[in-house]
Amino acid sequence: MNTNKKSLEFCIIGCGRLGISLAVFLSKQGFIPKAFSSKSRDSAQKALEFAGRGQVYDNPVDAVKTCDLVFITTPDTIIEPVCEKIAEENGFNSDSFVYHLSGALSSGILTSAKNNGASTGSIHPLQAFAPYEKGQKSPFKGINMSIEGDDTAIEFGKEIVNALRANSFTIPTHAKTVYHASAVVASNYLVTLEHFALELLKEADLSEENAYEILEPLIMGTLNNIKARGSVNALTGPVARGDDEIVSRHLSDIDKKLPRFSKLYRLMGQYTLDIADRRGEISDDARQKLAGLFEF
Ligand SMILES: NC(=O)c1ccc[n+]([C@@H]2O[C@H](COP(=O)([O-])OP(=O)(O)OC[C@H]3O[C@@H](n4cnc5c(N)ncnc54)[C@H](OP(=O)(O)O)[C@@H]3O)[C@@H](O)[C@H]2O)c1
């Protein structure tokens, strides 16, 4: 760590799922919890108890004055107004570091702290955090965390991520929203897609549990193929083969039995056809027939 001792002392504003986990696992790595402030005193008190040391402050301004490393871990919509309120009262020490951990928002929402002389950044863990439970394993270990912000905040951010035993990568400030959209598609929409697949198998009289077990090796094999060969080359199946007859059969069954998925199947088909097309392996005739089937 090439920063001075003062910047290892940190405060947490917003003591919820991420704020408490961050406090616990940073303190295990030599960072020093100094102050906790939250909407309710109870949450701040809970954070202090889990982290093992520090002090609870009702006013976030008093909390941030105690240290040079500030994490604002409130819900996304509150980060900017909370930061502005602290800055208005000159709460941030000049030369301090101020971070938030939102995936969708950039360090731009911390401009008021920057105007107080702080370095500002965002550090986003690609992980789903449940409420902290005493003695649990670190949810940070081995995960990937994006960092964005001014140069100084990025450099210190890398040290923070490294201390959490996670991997860091940097992204441009302007790309924060599209980066977060990617994470939503990769995680949340994958769930939607697998739910769709499971509903189709239920139509074949399989329970959700059995259906998942049946599909799991296929799902994992596909993920491995993407990793090994890239998303374009990992594509297999009737669209990649230009087999419009099979796709037509799927559609007539789905339209009849599960019409609520008709649009989704067609929309996914349109994008899958784009990917197949990039490989240049399907004939013009098959492409046109498939494109016609996928229209809605
Ligand atoms: N959870 C995740 O999986 C996850 C993953 C990646 C990033 N993040 C990011 O982490 C941040 C926090 O998310 P979270 O899931 O930890 O949310 P959370 O569990 O709802 O915690 C937010 C905390 O902020 C406190 N708070 C609300 N308004 C406040 C105010 N005006 N001043 C001070 N504290 C206030 C709440 O206080 P009280 O408890 O005192 O009422 C709550 O404890 C967000 O930016 C989110 O995007 C979350």
Image: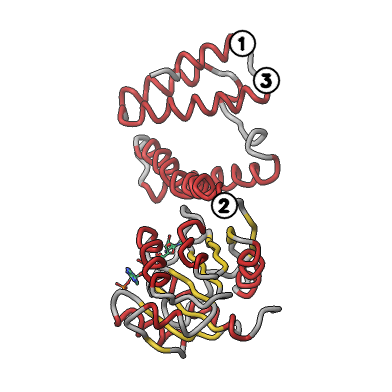
Q: Which residue is mark 1?
A: 284
Q: Which residue is mark 3?
A: 281
* Residue 198 point in image, percent of width and height: 40, 42
Residue type pointed to by label 3: Glu
The one of 153 and 43 positioned closer to us in this rendering: 153
Tell me how far mark 2 sits from mark 1, CA to CA.
42 Å
Indicate left or right for 278 with 132 as reference: right
SS at mark 1? helix
SS at mark 2? helix
Q: Which residue is mark 2?
A: 173
- Which image quarter holds the N terminus? bottom right
In which quadrant of this rendering is ligand 1 seen? Answer: bottom left
Residue 14 lies, with reference to residue 195, above or below; the image says below
Q: Which comes before the other along the chain, label 3 or label 2?
A: 2
Residue 289 lies, with reference to residue 17, above or below; the image says above
* Residue 34 point in image, percent of width and height: 48, 86
Dot 2 crowding, Cα within 10 Å, few <14, some 14–19, many 20+: some
Q: Residue at x 40, y 30 (%)?
A: 264
* Residue 39 point in image, percent of width and height: 30, 74
Disc 3 + disc 2, Cβ < 8 Å = no
Which quadrant holds residue 273?
top right
Residue type pointed to by label 1: Asp
Q: Nearer the viewer, mark 3 or mark 2?
A: 2
* Residue 99 point in image, percent of width and height: 51, 67
Indicate left or right for 124 with 267 as reference: right
Dot 1 crowding, Cα within 10 Å, few <14, some 14–19, many 20+: few
The one of 138 and 251 positioned closer to us in this rendering: 138
Note whether residue 146 is visible.
no
Q: Is mark 3 within 8 Å of ligand 1?
A: no
Disc 3 + disc 1, Cβ < 8 Å = no
Q: Residue at x 59, y 70 (%)?
A: 141
Residue type pointed to by label 2: Thr
